[in-house]
Image (cartoon, rainbow, N blue to C red):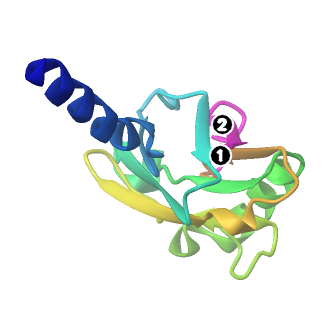
């Protein structure tokens, strides 16, 4: 009887940990211009959500750089176009662009970076994540879904 009671208490106390929101994700980009994820779920219970980006390729950022940009899906093409004009020194993201919820720095093969997204900024979607390196956004993109 004591064993059963101990087991019940242990299971009940573990439940909050099992139900806790995951407030980060690992994302990989490669030299074939592909992300390893097509969708990222963000819990509304997170104050901020972190995307850890790893470039698994070998090419330098000037040739095959990757970043991750979060925006409304409808704004991707315009943000990418303005990013090209901003150039590599600006990580191919126009400074102060109000359409950009968050973005990482540009990285090359073997490098990593992270971006923190203030979840409160994710209001009416739909949202996406994409790479704004010239020509990449057509292939390197996915949906970012806000979950209860």
Across and down, in percent, residue 28 comes to 41, 37
Q: Secondary structure at mark 1?
A: strand
Residue at 55% of width from left, 52% of height from top?
68
| Nearest the eye: 19 or 28 | 19
| Nearest the eye: 147 or 107 | 147
Q: Which residues are magenta?
A: 134-148
Q: Does residue 50 sit above or below 59 in this rendering?
A: below
Q: Secondary structure at mark 2?
A: strand
Name the image quarter holding the C terminus.
top right
Across and down, in percent, residue 106 comes to 46, 60
Dot 1: within a 10 Å radius of its alpha carbon, few (fewer than 14), some, or many (20 or more) residues?
Answer: many
Residue at mark 1? 129
Residue at mark 2? 141
Dot 2: within a 10 Å radius of its alpha carbon, few (fewer than 14), some, or many (20 or more) residues?
Answer: many
Q: Is residue 142 left or right of residue 15?
A: right
- The reply to whether the C-beta atoms of the residues labelled 2 and 1 are less than 8 Å apart is yes
């Amino acid at each position: 009887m004591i064993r059963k009671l101990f087991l019940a208490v242990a299971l009940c106390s573990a439940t909050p940990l099992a139900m806790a929101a995951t407030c980060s994700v690992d994302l990989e980009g490669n030299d074939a211009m592909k992300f390893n994820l097509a969708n990222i779920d963000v819990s509304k219970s997170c104050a901020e959500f972190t995307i850890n980006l790893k470039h698994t390729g070998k090419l330098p950022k000037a040739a095959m750089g990757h970043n991750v940009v979060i925006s409304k899906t409808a704004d991707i093409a315009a943000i990418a176009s303005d990013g090209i004009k901003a150039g590599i020194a600006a990580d191919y993201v126009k400074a102060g662009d109000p359409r950009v919820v968050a973005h990482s720095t540009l990285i090359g093969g073997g490098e990593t970076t992270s971006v923190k997204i203030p979840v409160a900024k994710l209001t009416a979607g739909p949202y996406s994540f994409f790479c704004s390196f010239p020509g990449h956004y057509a292939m390197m993109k996915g949906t970012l879904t806000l979950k209860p």
